[in-house]
Structures are given as structure tokens and as C-alpha cells.
């Protein structure tokens, strides 16, 4: 039972470099999400994909792009990394995009931008 | 707009003592409420959720929470703390028709004293 798998687990980038964070789920879920977690701020939604073929902006989308590659995979791209994007990034999935449905999380990617 | 407030960023209790983590929400319509737990270097795991029906909700690991509409609260309790309960706990609210509209609190770190 892998659940939600994120790669890489750790990454250090220099300002201006680009990077793609990978996420895959094996639960046949329709909806997938990207969050960032910063100290004292809980989780903030960056982008989400309610179903295969759709993506929408969340609370903090600036500086990021996403791709829903297929039903299993949802990637997050930083085109030109900035120190303010230093954070822990979590991918999550849920069976569908309806209120009350819990989300299942990966173990996170710890990203530092120098 | 919906929001979540967790009172106390850090709570410390003795092993065997009552655990009480406080969560208040703001919502203009009946909410869906969640508690998630995060162990070090892991993603969030669902502890319990309230959607409709019984206001006392039982979750995993002996935790429970009570939805009190009049107090707009959803406090998390456990009668007897165990060392393995040390983690960060997040309260979350979902109000709209989309699960993507989950708002997370800023988290409460629970420490257990031997």
C-alpha cells in the first residue's frame, strides 16, 4: 500500500533554478492537490486537480505551475525558484472533489532555495 | 468566509493525562470538520471527521471530538495520553461543495511528558 508517493524527499536549489516535484497515487483517486507547509501557517493550497484533465489555482499559486499527467500523477513545477519558496511541499489525493471527503497525503518534499 | 483557529501552538501533558486540543471554526453554513495528525517527517493522516449526524465523533488511536454548533467548536480529546501521541495536530474545515476548499488551522504541537 504505497498510497501517495512524492519524489524527491529533499532538494536544495539555487535562486533562479527550475525544478519539478513529482507525485503519484495508487488509490484510483480522481482529485489531487499540492500544498505548502510553512511554520505556524498550517497548509496552504497551491493548485488542485478535481479530475483528470482539469487544474485550478488555490490560495498561493504564484510562481508555480502544475500538470495532471494522467489519473495517477500530478506534478508541481517551479520555473524560477525564489528563497520565499523554501518550504515543505505536500501532495494529497481524494476520491472525489466533494466536501467531507478526506484527503490522503504523501510524506512531503523538503525544498530549500539558496 | 470559513476559517479555523487552533488555540495554543504547543500543548504539553503528562503520560496518562487528559489530552484536550482546541479548535474553533467560522462558517456561514454547516461545516464539515476534520482533525489530522502529522508525525515527524511524515504527511498528514486523518484522525476523524464530522460530516452530519452524531456530534460526538470517534477516531483512531482513542481520539474523539465533539461538534458544538452553539460554540462553533470541534475540540479533540483523548482520556489518557500515550508517548506515541506526540505529534502535530491540525484542525480543518470544509464548507463548500468542493473538497478543495479545505482550510487548515495553524496546528498544535502535542508533547507528552514521561
Image: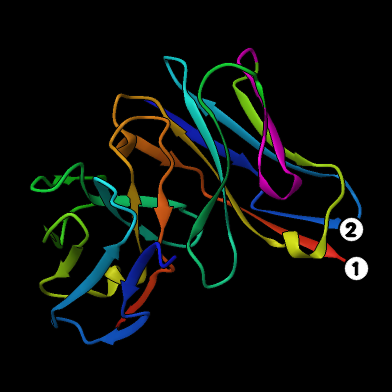
Secondary structure under the numbered disc 1 in the rendered image: loop
Image location of residue A67, percent across then percent down: 11, 60
- Label 2 neighbourhood size at 10 Å, few (<14), some (14-19), many (20+)? some
Residue A85 occupies which quadrant of the picture?
A: bottom left
> Could you tell whether B4 is left or right of A14 in the image?
right
Spatial separation of the CA atoms under disc 1 and disc 2: 6 Å
Instruction: Indicate the quadrant containing the C terminus of chain B: top left, top right, bottom left or bottom right.
Output: bottom right
Give the magenta-colored segment's residue range.
B57-70
B73 or A66, which is in the foreground? A66
Disc 1: which residue: B114
Whether pointer 1 and pointer 2 mark residues with C-beta atoms closer than 8 Å, the reply is yes
Disc 2: which residue: B14
The residue depicted at 58 percent of the width and 70 percent of the height is B40
The chain carrying label 1 is B
The disc, 1 or 2, on the residue closer to the chain's N-terminal end is 2
Residue B29 to residue A90: above or below: above
Is residue B68 found inside the magenta-colored segment of the image? Answer: yes
Residue B54 occupies which quadrant of the picture?
A: top right
Image location of residue A8, percent across then percent down: 31, 80
The chain carrying label 2 is B
Image location of residue B104, percent across then percent down: 46, 43
The residue depicted at 26 percent of the width and 51 percent of the height is A32
The residue depicted at 39 percent of the width and 25 percent of the height is B95
Residue B82 occupies which quadrant of the picture?
A: bottom right
- Label 1 neighbourhood size at 10 Å, few (<14), some (14-19), many (20+)? few
Is residue A4 found inside the magenta-colored segment of the image? Answer: no
Image location of residue B52, percent across then percent down: 53, 18
**Residue B30 visible in the displayed image:** yes
Amino acid at each position: 500500500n504505497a498510497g501517495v508517493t512524492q519524489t524527491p524527499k529533499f532538494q536544495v536549489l539555487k535562486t533562479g533554478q527550475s525544478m519539478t516535484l513529482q507525485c503519484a497515487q495508487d488509490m484510483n483517486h480522481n482529485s489531487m492537490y499540492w500544498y505548502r507547509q510553512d511554520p505556524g501557517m498550517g497548509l496552504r493550497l497551491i493548485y488542485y486537480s478535481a479530475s483528470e484533465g482539469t487544474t485550478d489555482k488555490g490560495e498561493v499559486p504564484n510562481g508555480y505551475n502544475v500538470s495532471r499527467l494522467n489519473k495517477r500523477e500530478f506534478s508541481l513545477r517551479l520555473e524560477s525558484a525564489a528563497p520565499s519558496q523554501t518550504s515543505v511541499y505536500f501532495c494529497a489525493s481524494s476520491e472525489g472533489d466533494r466536501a467531507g471527503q478526506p484527503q490522503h497525503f504523501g510524506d512531503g518534499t523538503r525544498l530549500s532555495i539558496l | 468566509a470559513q476559517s479555523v483557529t487552533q488555540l495554543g501552538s504547543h500543548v504539553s501533558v503528562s503520560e496518562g493525562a487528559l489530552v484536550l486540543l482546541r479548535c474553533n471554526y467560522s462558517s456561514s453554513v454547516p461545516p464539515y470538520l476534520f482533525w489530522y495528525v502529522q508525525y515527524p517527517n511524515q504527511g498528514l493522516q486523518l484522525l476523524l471527521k464530522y460530516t452530519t449526524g452524531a456530534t460526538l465523533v470517534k477516531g483512531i488511536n482513542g481520539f474523539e471530538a465533539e461538534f458544538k454548533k452553539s460554540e462553533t467548536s470541534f475540540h479533540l480529546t483523548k482520556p489518557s495520553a500515550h508517548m506515541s501521541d506526540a505529534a502535530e495536530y491540525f484542525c480543518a474545515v470544509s464548507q463548500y461543495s468542493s473538497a478543495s476548499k479545505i482550510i487548515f488551522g495553524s496546528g498544535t504541537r502535542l508533547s507528552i511528558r514521561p
